Image: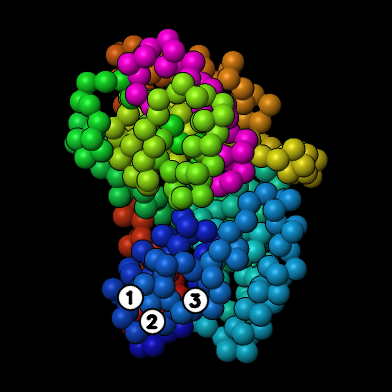
Amino acid sequence: MIKRVAIIAGETSGDILGSRLIASLKALNPEIQFEGIGGKEMHEQGCDCLYPMEKLAVMGFTEVIARLPELLKIRKTLINRWLDNKPDLVIGIDAPDFNLKLETILHQAGIPVAHYVSPSVWAWRSKRVQKMKGNLDLMLTLFPFEADFYRQHDIPVEFVGHPLADEVPLLSDKQPARKQLGLSAHEKILAILPGSRASEIKYLAPHFIKVAQHLQKEDPELRCVAPMVNDKIDKTFRQQCKVLAPSLVITIIKGESRKVMAASDAILMASGTAVLEGMFVGRPMVAAGKLSPITVWLVRTFGGLNVTYYTLPNNLANEELVAEFIQEDVSVDNILPAVKKMLYLDSQEKAGLLVKFNVLHQRLRKNASVTVAKVLAEKFALIE
């Protein structure tokens, strides 16, 4: 039974989710055809990618404004294409500023629509949820508190768990990771993950580098290890180290971020999905986040923030399990003592923290990609 599914992902995490979802749907019905926007992973699973995913991979208001005409043209082209030749289902994966408008127009034309990965309406710009009412057949959330939010607003929703929770083992042993990376079995290791975007390297990396230098001066045996997502980020980070902390001894590794986290005693990282991954790996963490001043002004002026915590582990637990520093609080003076505490955490306190991480990890383990595929296939008749 041939079915056509339109699917749109806007960045690397969405590409991974999309590829696994495509594979799971094909396992239920090998004749499903996929087209839309995706990256290498989705393409390899057979998705006909009409535009490079990088076209949508922008972050922050100022970055989006510069690319707005191109983004609007792409969205209009897709809408017209699918209005002329209606697919059996449209799946938007994350990228809410691009996908939600597209989904609304297509839904109003009678095309079934699902959105995978909730936008952070529970955190800011909560009025957006009103626009989803009646314009969305199903919201698929990675976290249980998100599903509770949508139920309160009478929007069809399913909590499907997080794919990373399925992928990362419940126990990540430190020593195999160290052996694979060529690191000593006995030294104290701080993993430094300054982010994968140029803006994160600009706003966060200088603080992280200075913190690492201070720590290494106090403990010359401390090993700092930083995984770099690509050559461009690697080059910029190395230059920052050379200028800001020429005496810092740091091991820079291409990729392998999860392995570096597993090998570490503590992690200093950019706020984002990586913090959730660090929780799954089970290491004490300090997270920081900083955007351009104009982006922050726009967020605070037009959206506001409705959260007590910023990082996902803290939101899931409703308590501070991860030390977090956002915007004006990002400074060496604030971050340094927090990292020092995590590196030399009392064994009893560390054990209690890891138990809480493990409980949350298990709660999010629901075989997500298979669960999403089954939910979509049954609700939208993608299988006989």
Q: From the viewer's perspective, is the residue at label 3 or at label 2 nearer?
A: 3
Q: In the rendered view of the protein, which quadrant contains the N terminus?
A: bottom left
The amino acid sitting under disc 2 is: Ile
Give the mark, 1 or 3, whose residue is nearer the N terminus: 1
Under tag 3, what secondary structure?
A: strand
Extent of the magenta region: 197-224
Task: Identify the secondary structure beneath mark 1.
Answer: helix
Verify CB contact (< 8 Å) between mark 1 and mark 2.
yes
Q: Position of residue 199 (x, y in %)?
A: 62, 43
For label 2, the residue is 32
Q: Which residue is labeled 1 in the image?
A: 26
Q: Residue at x 56, y 74 (%)?
A: 51
- Is the residue under label 2 in contact with that under label 3 (CB below 8 Å)? no
Image quarter of residue 204: top right
Q: Position of residue 362 (x, y in %)?
A: 31, 40
Q: Main secondary structure of the magenta part?
A: helix
Q: Name the amino acid type tagged 3.
A: Cys
Which badge, 1 or 2, is on the more N-terminal residue? Answer: 1
For residue 236, what is the image quadrant?
Answer: top right
